């Protein structure tokens, strides 16, 4: 069974990476293959990330998915083919048991991190739970979300920083929150690409600053984050969700090599 604590005890940081949403089997398998190749080379514990459905969309005509069961089966195939754990978002309590049949980690979206029924439903599946910190919450407030999962009998849980609302159309990362949340005894992940979103654009499509992915990620490793989360795509310009802030897949190896080198230096001190 996948364990966040086991992954966070490794010499390297761990990585959650993949497409924003599963667009099809070929693209998922391609991205997974490339991620597994570079993380294996660098000794980085890896979790494949892919949403089977996107519920939080700005416009009703935005792409949401290819069908729940079809996408979940693709996630299961990634796990079986490459021998890596997989993570996906859930949006309602009813989805928890369904998704748990296919994946190793259930992820609670930031906007839903206070939803008690959702947190408890994820916890009682026995799967690992990753709770994204709401853009509207302080790091200290996340101890209550964490405690809900623990009180439901599940201590296999991590917290994810994904930026704080900064005005109406921007986010910022307060790196003080990483050690603050680590005090709660759970691994802390930095969601690099979502931290660079520029939400609530007038066109109804979220913008982003992918040019700062390297900057945000390097800073996160420097302050001691346990894991890195990022979304990647062979060609973000044609991605069906969140392409504006995704990392081109071809740039992933060089980024991970830089982050690994920083981690090695940090571990000496």
Image: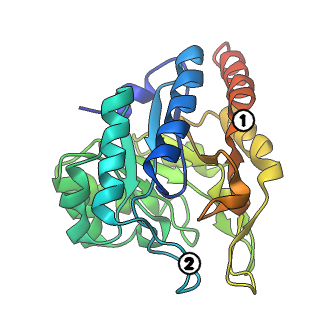
At numbered mark 1, what does the secondary structure look like: helix, strand or loop?
A: helix
Q: Percent from the top left, x then y, of residue 117? A: 24, 71
* Location of residue 261 by image quarter: top right
Q: Residue furthest right?
A: 211
Label 1 crowd bin: few (<14), some (14–19), many (20+), radius 10 Å: few
Look at mark 1 in the image and give the residue it sits on: 250
Vertical arrangement, residue 172 with respect to residue 4, above or below: below
Q: Quadrant of the N terminus?
A: top left
Q: Position of residue 181 (x, y in %)?
A: 50, 48
Q: Residue at x 32, y 64 (%)?
A: 68
Which residue is depicted at the point 59% across and 65% down? 241
Label for residue 62? 2
Where 263 sits versus 104, above or below?
A: above
From what the image shows, is residue 68 above or below residue 201?
above
Residue at image point 55% right, 50% down: 19
Please state if 95 lies on the left or on the right of 175 as rendered. left
Q: Position of residue 36 (x, y in %)?
A: 51, 27
Vertical placement of 216 versus 118: above or below? above
Numbered label tally: 2
Can residue 247 be seen? Answer: yes
């Amino acid at each position: 069974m996948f364990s966040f604590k086991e992954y966070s005890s490794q010499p390297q940081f761990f990585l959650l990476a993949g497409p924003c949403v599963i667009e099809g089997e070929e693209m998922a398998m391609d991205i997974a293959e490339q991620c597994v190749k570079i993380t294996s080379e660098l000794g980085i514990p890896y979790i494949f990330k892919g949403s089977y459905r996107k519920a939080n969309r700005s416009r009703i005509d935005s792409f949401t998915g290819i069908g729940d069961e079809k996408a979940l089966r693709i996630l299961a195939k990634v796990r079986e083919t490459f021998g890596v754990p997989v993570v996906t978002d859930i949006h309602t309590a009813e989805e928890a048991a369904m998704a748990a049949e296919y994946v190793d980690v259930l992820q609670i979206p930031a906007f839903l991190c206070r939803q008690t029924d959702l947190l408890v439903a994820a916890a009682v599946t026995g799967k690992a739970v990753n709770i994204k910190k709401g853009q509207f919450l302080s790091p200290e407030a996340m101890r209550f979300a964490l405690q809900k999962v623990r009180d439901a009998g599940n201590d296999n849980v991590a917290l994810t920083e994904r930026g704080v609302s900064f005005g109406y159309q921007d986010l910022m990362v307060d790196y003080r929150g990483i050690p603050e949340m680590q005090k709660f005894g759970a691994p802390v992940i930095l969601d690099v690409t979502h931290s660079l979103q520029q939400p609530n654009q007038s066109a109804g499509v979220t913008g982003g600053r992918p040019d700062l992915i390297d900057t945000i990620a390097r800073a996160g490793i420097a302050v001691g984050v346990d894991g890195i989360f990022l979304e990647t795509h062979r060609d973000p310009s044609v991605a069906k969700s969140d392409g504006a802030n995704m990392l081109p897949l071809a740039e992933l190896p060089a980024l991970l090599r830089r982050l690994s080198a920083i981690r090695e230096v940090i571990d000496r001190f």
